[in-house]
């Protein structure tokens, strides 16, 4: 089982930056793909960015060029650097982990961290 804890959310002005962190438990962390998702009020949860065990990344079109996902396997950490934030980035951001056996294995979610972009 994997436990995920997000941090780093908060209130930021449009154009500002935030860095979200996802701390993961488990000795097999380096083998997991990790994704950052977000859910705004009244909207479905959507994938923002993901990184594979090999370091390949993909991004939602809405955040390309502004957000960067990275991982530090030695620390069991995944980060989401968010620059040039817009009001439409306001949402609860969740960290998700998938093992190489997913979907045969369950995936795991953190509790989320609130990001609010407002002047």
Image (tube, grey):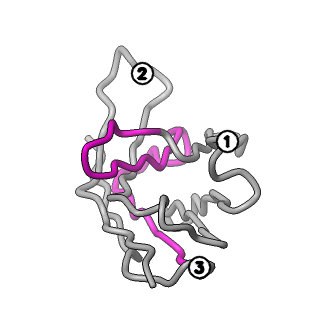
- Whole-Å distance between the Cαs marked 2 and 3? 32 Å
Tell me the magenta residue range.
Answer: 18-46
Q: At x 33% / y 36%, what residue is drawn?
A: 44
Q: Position of residue 78 (x, y in %)?
A: 52, 60
Answer with left or right where residue 104 lies relative to residue 51: left
Q: On screen, 103 above or below 64?
A: above
The residue identified by callout 1 is 61
- Whole-Å distance between the Cαs marked 1 and 2? 25 Å
- Whole-Å distance between the Cαs marked 3 and 1? 18 Å
Q: Position of residue 110 (x, y in %)?
A: 28, 53
Q: At x 72% / y 40%, what residue is drawn?
A: 56
Answer with left or right where residue 116 lies relative to residue 70: left
Q: At x 39% / y 64%, what residue is drawn?
A: 23
**How packed is label 3: few (under 14 Cα within 10 Å), some, or many (20 or more)?**
some
From the image, state whether disc 1 or disc 2 is nearer to you.
1
Task: Say which element carries label 2.
Answer: loop
Q: On screen, 25 above or below 14?
A: above
């Amino acid at each position: 089982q994997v436990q995920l804890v997000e941090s780093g959310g908060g209130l930021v002005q449009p154009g500002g930056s935030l860095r979200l962190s996802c701390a993961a438990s488990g000795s097999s962390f380096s083998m997991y793909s990790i994704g950052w998702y977000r859910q705004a009020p009244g909207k479905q949860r959507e994938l923002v960015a993901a990184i594979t065990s090999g370091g390949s990344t993909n991004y939602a079109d809405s955040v390309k060029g502004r957000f960067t996902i990275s991982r530090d396997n030695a620390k069991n950490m995944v980060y989401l650097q968010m620059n040039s934030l817009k009001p439409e980035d306001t949402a609860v951001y969740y960290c998700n982990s998938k093992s190489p056996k997913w979907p045969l294995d369950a995936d795991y979610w953190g509790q989320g961290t609130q990001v609010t972009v407002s002047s």
